[in-house]
Image (cartoon, rainbow, N blue to C red):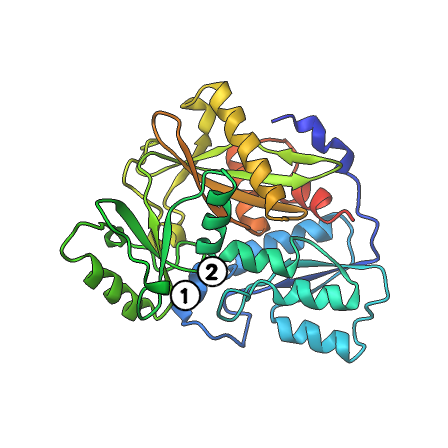
Amino acid sequence: MNISLFQDYLKPANVKKIILVANVYGKTEHYISSPEQLKIEFFNEREMNEIKISLREEGYDFLAYYDEHEFISDVENHVVNPDEDILVFNLARNGYGVSKKSLIPTFCDYYKIKYTGSNGYTCSLARNKHHVSNLLLQNNLHGLKTWVYEDGWQLGMVPDGCMEVIIKPLFESASKGIRPDCIINTSSINFENKVREKYLELKSPLVVEQFIHGYECKVPIFVLDNLSVCDPIGISINGNQNLDKMIITQDLSYHYSYDNYALSECFSNSVIEEIKEYAGKVFEFLGMENYGRIDCRVTPNSILMTTLQCHTLHIIVKCFICLEVTTFHKENYLMLFLIRP
């Protein structure tokens, strides 16, 4: 990646105040999910303190909210003036359902408040794995075959033949609900029973997704003056770069029990450039804005497939830290251009 692309963004953002809206385990008082699920998806206090310290060190005037409804209430009751030159740093994802990350962007659009990340429509779309995969398939963008189960098969469409699949919650992230037993072959006599059991266990609509053996990588993308696609970052588990059948389970995700490496260690430059070109096309095709991340599985013979994620800052920060892209304070470095209007 050409680090010089980011040099012009190492200057303070021209905003009067930054409003940080995020969900933090132990700080967010109103929530729907179980405490165990919150630990997986919410920030912890250490992560949030790092972000706040970064903003403070750069001299920004900022205000932090840990509940979406408290921020909304303060705007509507004129505690926060939407007509001031403010920018909302949106890291919120409380609640349940496909649109839970869309509340703040949609609210900010209504009041014409600047914010980080994609708009409400794109945030919701990116969480529906079935819709995204089918859009990508129909546009020759390496989508995966998927089926939806919600107390029965959607439209009566059932996977047939002999195919290895992975069973996931339809619209969750952070590997919520993912365990090793989620991978199964459709030819198994226990297949439909397993899908039913997962549905009852997770109490959530499921996507049954074609499973790809091989490498896994994430591709952070930023919109600077132009679209800037970073080099793919590989994921290794127990020292294995070729994951084959391994996946990041809920437990591995929660404990960060996996490592990152430059995918270029395993693939030629032509394959790396193909992945970057493809990720950029997906980003643009789905209408993603400001920044996001495209996740891919790549077979050992370089066949690329995708599962899309529209992720927030803390995941991207970890990607950059692992590759040590700069000698600057890593969180500062990212925030300086992410919050620039």
Picture disc at residue 37: 1
Q: Position of residue 244 (x, y in %)?
A: 29, 35
Q: Nearer the viewer, residue 88 or 207?
A: 207
Q: Nearer the viewer, residue 186 or 120?
A: 186
Residue 231 visible at all: no
Instruction: Please report contact status of discs 2 and 1: CB closer than 8 Å, yes or no.
Output: yes
Horizontal relation, residue 331 to residue 321: left or right: right
Q: Which residue is at a point 45% across and 66% down the rendered structure image? A: 38
Residue 228 vertical placement versus 209 (above, below)? above
Q: What residue type is labelled 1?
A: Gln
- Local packing at callout 2 (Cα closer than 10 Å; few below 14, some 14-19, many 20+) is many
Residue 227 visible at all: yes
Q: How far apart are marks 2 and 1 (CA)?
A: 7 Å
Q: Specify the quadrant of the image occupied by residue 86.
A: bottom right
Location of mark 2 (residue)? 41
Helix, strand or loop status at disc 2: helix
Q: Which amino acid does label 2 sit on?
A: Glu
Q: Position of residue 88 (x, y in %)?
A: 72, 60
Q: Which residue is at a point 28% across and 53% down the rendered structure image? A: 159
Q: Which residue is at a point 27% across and 54% down the rendered structure image? A: 182
